[in-house]
Image (cartoon, grey):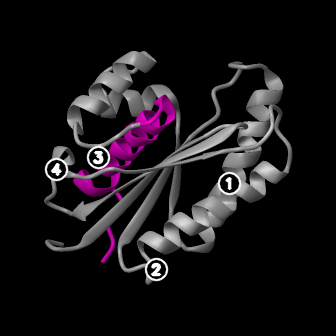
């Protein structure tokens, strides 16, 4: 498996925006030596509407095809599941619409997708399942001091990607050649 190129997408969706971080490297690359590539797509308006689904899926398509146009990397994606109750029922429902459409887009590229809850990725990536937003930002920014994280969502997406790197590359539950 040495020399296989891996990429893991960490995705933090919501009804109002989409943050995505790409980590890529070879199997032996330590997480601290990865370079996070962070992308952010805000959605227009103040309330969810179905155009957010189209904008989100187009954004994911653009990122996936620009960064690996020939799909030569072994690629996995991890997307944060909706936080039930935070922001009310409609917030949870609209976040699941966006996440479902993104999962469908990734699967059209034959990219396996795992849904992870926020306390699980925080425990693996940050070391603390109940890490606060400040804890996450401080940890991620200290791991990658040369990367600009323009907002909390980019830090979260990077934490989600780190969780995926740990599960898919380091621990190799689904390794393929």
Q: Residues within 10 Å of mark 1 (few under 14, many from 20)?
A: many
- Span of residues in magenta: 150-177
- The overriding secondary structure of the stretch rendered in magenta is helix
Q: Position of residue 57 (x, y in %)?
A: 68, 60
The relative height of residue 4 versus residue 122 in the rendered view (above or below) is below
Residue 31, position as x, y percentages in the image: 21, 47
The label nearer to you, 4 versus 3, is 4
Residue holding disc 4: 33
Q: Is residue 137 above or below residue 65?
A: above
Provide the residue designation for mark 2.
69
How many neighbours does mark 4 have within 10 angstroms: few (below 14), some (14-19), or many (20 or more)? few
Place of residue 99 in the rendered image (x, y in percent of width and height, measured from the top left):
67, 47
Q: Quadrant of residue 15?
A: top right
Check if mark 2's residue and mark 3's residue have beta carbons within 8 Å: no
Label 2 neighbour load within 10 Å: few <14, some 14-19, many 20+: few
Mark 2 to mark 3 CA distance (whole Å): 25 Å
Q: In this orientation, does residue 131 appear?
A: no
Residue drawn 60% across the image and 37% down it: 81
The disc label shown at residue 166, or none:
3
Density class for disc 3 (Cα within 10 Å; few <14, some 14-19, many ≥20) is some
Provide the residue designation for mark 1: 56
């Amino acid at each position: 498996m040495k020399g296989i190129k891996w990429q893991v997408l960490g995705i933090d969706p919501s009804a109002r925006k989409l943050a995505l971080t790409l980590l890529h490297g070879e199997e032996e690359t330590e997480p601290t030596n990865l370079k996070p590539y962070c992308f952010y797509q805000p959605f227009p308006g103040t309330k969810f509407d179905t155009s957010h689904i189209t904008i989100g899926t187009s954004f994911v398509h653009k990122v996936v095809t620009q960064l690996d146009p020939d799909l030569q990397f072994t690629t996995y994606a991890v997307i944060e599941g909706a936080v039930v109750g935070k922001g009310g029922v409609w917030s949870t429902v609209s976040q699941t619409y966006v996440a479902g459409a993104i999962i469908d887009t990734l699967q059209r590229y034959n990219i396996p997708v795992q849904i992870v809850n926020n306390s699980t990725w925080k425990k693996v990536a940050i070391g603390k399942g109940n890490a606060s937003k400040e804890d996450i930002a401080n940890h991620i920014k200290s791991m990658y001091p040369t990367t600009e994280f323009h907002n909390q969502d980019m830090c979260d997406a990077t934490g989600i990607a780190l969780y995926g790197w740990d599960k898919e590359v380091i621990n190799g539950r689904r390794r393929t050649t």
